[in-house]
């Protein structure tokens, strides 16, 4: 299997490429592959792919994309070339079970079955900025959710009352983030729960400084080391990957493709969406990925649903599940904020889709989150409720598609809503939503029940 | 549609140029531009109509999901090519002076998607764009803005911890006595309109489409 040292060498010796040329080459290559492998959406809209041949063709397209282009290192402006054998070896060696945590909180994250089967693995939060006064309490709240398998950190703009600016303060803040996570899970009575460091910046020193068995990352914890969009990597991330590979932490990656960007449209995003987690495994040894396809317009919160994005996401995850053993998770990103019914309906739809697509679930948060406005524990608990109900219902692809279609019709024409700050709709001391938000939750749950979901 | 004082065949050529640009027909657009010059149609008219209308059309297509970021790049390149053809023979001082933008992701920020989108939208929307890339120190923004006589500095930040560098650029402009020379627009995932006001930016762009609308409004280009 190609070593990280080999990758590092290739970032220094590979062919020099102007970034704009890389971007346009990516588009042209993927466009050609979409045509070559006949990747196109069916005539009638659907949320879940029903064509069993399509994921294999899409997978082949992704392999060819990686073989033809490689990965672009933005630090050195060079191409990291890969041959097909190297890619296939990585795929073969990719683990489908990731152990994490210690003691009674030891967990195994698994590749799930398509159309569900076992209860999915859960990261209920964060990946959304909170102020330091709430930090430890927020972590405690999320860690108290029994199904939590790991908890990710978050960004923040101030530490010890000072604005964070510059590498020394970033290092200090990074260690504080890890310490808050450690402290929060202890307060929740789960000292062995795995924590995942969320980079507050991507400099190597910020990523590595949190290794600390007592106050920071242990060998049984994890770190987020994401490939950039358009199959781009950074040397600082690679440096951290080399260190953590020896230390022992598991690594996760944001590996979805963005339709509308340089990968092109929906079909192009399928190709990048499959290629990217494989590339992340090669470049950083990431073993858990939030995968699929998003759209520029839904990530920006401009529209709730974008035609064909869900279908494209299911093609990606069916391909990764069948042909790459990838451990995937669905990053649940509603376009509406906390405290709104639309937020909860979107979360429900994304959770149903995830289970049927063989994905675990990760950190529901508003797509355009700002400080203290991204998520509350209720959304995570709701996500788990819906996922478990979906698993229990034994929904197949056709059944899930029918349900999602009906739910989509119920929110047709609605625009994303801003939502509320966590302190406006959730009581972190008593660990429950404020009455008004609780009422919203009950109404949405009843609506889901009327739509055909039986809650356990 | 331009006013009725233009002969029909000239109007048809201007419309043809617009359509060729939107279709990203490089050869066709360049040939049409050459014909416009040959027919002695006012090239400024072609720039203000054909290219401007094409920019609106492609912006709309991006907004509705009919086209993607690479199309904006190709249209931007084609607009530059066509403008060069049309401006042959026009004295430099009479050429339509585009508003100049310097854009980049601020220091410490390696994320380029949002910045690419905004830069490309601005370019296809008629701005001259100088993209400094990612992880750009304040001094680099300011020096480039001075070098190219920019009208607008656009600062992108996707991380909460890099947002202070947007403020740093503005503070540096103030301390150098240059604040009045450049408009500043900020944007990015965690950035808000309130933050833009707080740090003294001139404008905030919620996303790429919004950034173009705001920038055009800023310079009376609607």
Image (tube, helix red, strand yellow):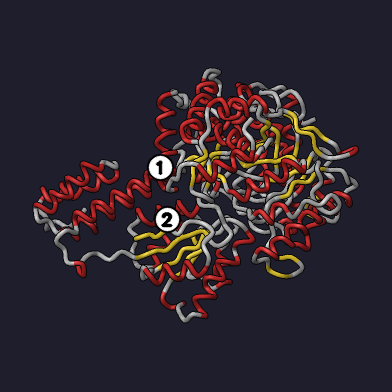
Would you say residue A142 is visible in this rendering? yes
**Label 1 secondary element:** helix
Q: Quadrant of the C terminus of chain B?
A: bottom left
Between the C-alphas of marks 2 and 1, the distance is: 15 Å
Nearer to us in this view, A283 or B83: A283
The furthest residue to the top: A53
Left or right: residue A122 versus residue A202 is: right
Name the residue tied to disc 1. Answer: A24
Q: Is residue B60 above or below residue B174?
A: above
Q: Where A319 sits versus A341, above or below? A: above
Nearer the observer, B157 or A374: B157
Residue A93 image position (x, y, % from top left): 67, 27
Q: Tag 1, which chain?
A: A
Q: Is residue B165 above or below residue A110?
A: below
Against A37, residue A170 (above or below) is below
Determine which of the numbered discs, if any, sits on residue B119 in the image. Answer: 2
Tell whether B192 sits left or right of A152.
Answer: left
- Given residues B202 and A196, the one toward you in this image is A196
Q: Classify mark 1: residues with Cα within 10 Å, few (<14), some (14-19) or many (20+).
A: some
Where residue B12 appears, as percent x and y from the top left, is: 15, 47
How busy is the neighbourhood of tag 2: few (under 14 within 10 Å), some, or many (20 plus)? many
Q: Position of residue A128 (x, y in %)?
A: 68, 52
State the SS at label 2: helix
The answer to whether tags 2 and 1 share a subunit is: no
- Camera-side mark, 2 or 1: 1
**Please, which chain is the residue tagged with disc 2 on?**
B
The residue drawn where x is 48% and y is 70% is B202
Q: Are marks 2 and 1 in contact (CB under 8 Å)?
A: no
Residue B153 figure quarter: bottom left
Q: Is residue A140 visible?
A: no
A3 vs B189, nearest the viewer: A3
């Amino acid at each position: 299997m190609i070593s990280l040292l080999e990758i590092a060498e290739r970032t220094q010796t590979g062919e020099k490429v102007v970034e704009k040329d890389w971007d346009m080459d990516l588009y042209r290559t993927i466009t050609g592959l979409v045509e070559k492998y006949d990747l196109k959406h069916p005539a009638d809209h659907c949320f879940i792919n029903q064509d069993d041949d399509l994921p294999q063709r899409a997978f082949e397209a992704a392999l060819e994309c990686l073989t033809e282009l490689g990965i672009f290192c933005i630090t050195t402006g060079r191409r990291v070339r890969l041959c097909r054998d190297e890619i296939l070896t990585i795929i073969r060696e990719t683990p489908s079970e990731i152990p994490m945590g210690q003691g009674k909180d030891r967990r195994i994250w698994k590749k799930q079955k398509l159309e569900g089967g076992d209860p999915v693995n859960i990261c209920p939060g964060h990946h959304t900025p909170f102020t330091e006064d709430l930090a430890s309490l927020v972590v405690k709240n999320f860690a108290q959710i029994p199904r939590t398998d790991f908890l990710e950190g978050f960004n923040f703009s101030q530490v010890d009352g000072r604005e964070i600016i510059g590498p020394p303060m970033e290092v200090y803040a990074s260690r504080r983030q890890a310490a808050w996570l450690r402290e929060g899970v202890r307060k929740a009575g789960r000292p062995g729960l795995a924590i995942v460091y969320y980079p507050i910046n991507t400099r190597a020193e910020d990523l590595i400084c949190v290794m600390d068995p007592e106050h920071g990352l242990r060998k049984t914890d994890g770190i987020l080391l994401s490939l950039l969009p358009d199959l781009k990597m950074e040397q600082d991330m690679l440096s951290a990957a080399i260190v953590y590979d020896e230390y022992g932490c598991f690594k996760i990656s944001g590996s979805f493709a963005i339709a509308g960007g340089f990968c092109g449209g929906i079909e192009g995003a399928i190709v990048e969406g499959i290629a990217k987690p494989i590339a992340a495994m090669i470049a950083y040894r990431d073993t858990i990925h939030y995968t699929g396809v998003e759209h520029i317009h839904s990530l920006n919160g401009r529209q709730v649903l974008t035609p064909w994005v869900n279908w494209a996401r299911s093609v990606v995850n069916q391909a990764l599940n069948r042909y790459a053993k990838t451990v995937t998770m669905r990053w649940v990103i509603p376009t509406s904020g906390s405290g709104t019914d639309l937020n909860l309906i979107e979360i429900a739809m994304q959770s149903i889709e995830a289970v049927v697509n063989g994905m675990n679930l990760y950190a529901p948060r508003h797509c355009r989150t700002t400080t203290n406005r991204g998520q509350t524990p209720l959304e995570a608990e709701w996500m788990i409720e819906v996922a478990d109900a979906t698993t229990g219902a034994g929904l197949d692809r056709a059944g899930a598609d029918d349900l999602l279609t009906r739910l989509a019709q119920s929110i047709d024409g609605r625009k994303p809503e801003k939502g509320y700050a966590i302190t406006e709709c959730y009581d972190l001391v008593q660990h429950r939503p404020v009455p008004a938000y609780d009422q919203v939750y009950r109404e949405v749950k009843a609506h889901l029940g009327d739509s055909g979901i039986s809650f356990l | 549609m331009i006013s009725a004082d233009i002969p029909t065949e000239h109007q048809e050529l201007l419309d043809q140029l617009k359509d060729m640009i939107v279709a990203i027909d490089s050869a066709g657009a360049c040939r049409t531009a050459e014909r416009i010059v040959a027919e002695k149609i006012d090239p400024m008219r072609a720039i203000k109509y054909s290219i401007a209308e094409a920019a609106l059309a492609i912006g709309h297509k991006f907004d509705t999901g009919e086209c993607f970021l690479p199309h904006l790049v190709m249209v931007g390149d084609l607009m530059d090519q066509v403008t060069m053809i049309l401006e042959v023979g026009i004295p430099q001082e009479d050429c339509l002076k585009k508003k100049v933008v310097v854009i980049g992701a601020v220091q410490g920020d390696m994320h380029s998607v949002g910045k690419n989108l905004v830069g490309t939208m601005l370019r296809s929307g008629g701005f001259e764009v100088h993209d400094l890339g990612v992880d750009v120190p304040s001094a680099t923004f300011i020096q480039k803005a001075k070098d190219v006589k920019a009208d607008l500095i656009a600062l992108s930040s996707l991380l909460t911890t890099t947002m202070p560098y947007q403020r740093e650029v503005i503070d540096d402009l103030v301390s150098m006595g240059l604040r009045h020379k450049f408009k500043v627009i900020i944007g990015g995932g965690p950035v808000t309109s309130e933050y833009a006001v707080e740090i003294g930016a001139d404008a905030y762009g919620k996303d790429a489409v919004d950034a173009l609308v705001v920038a055009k409004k800023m310079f009376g280009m609607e």
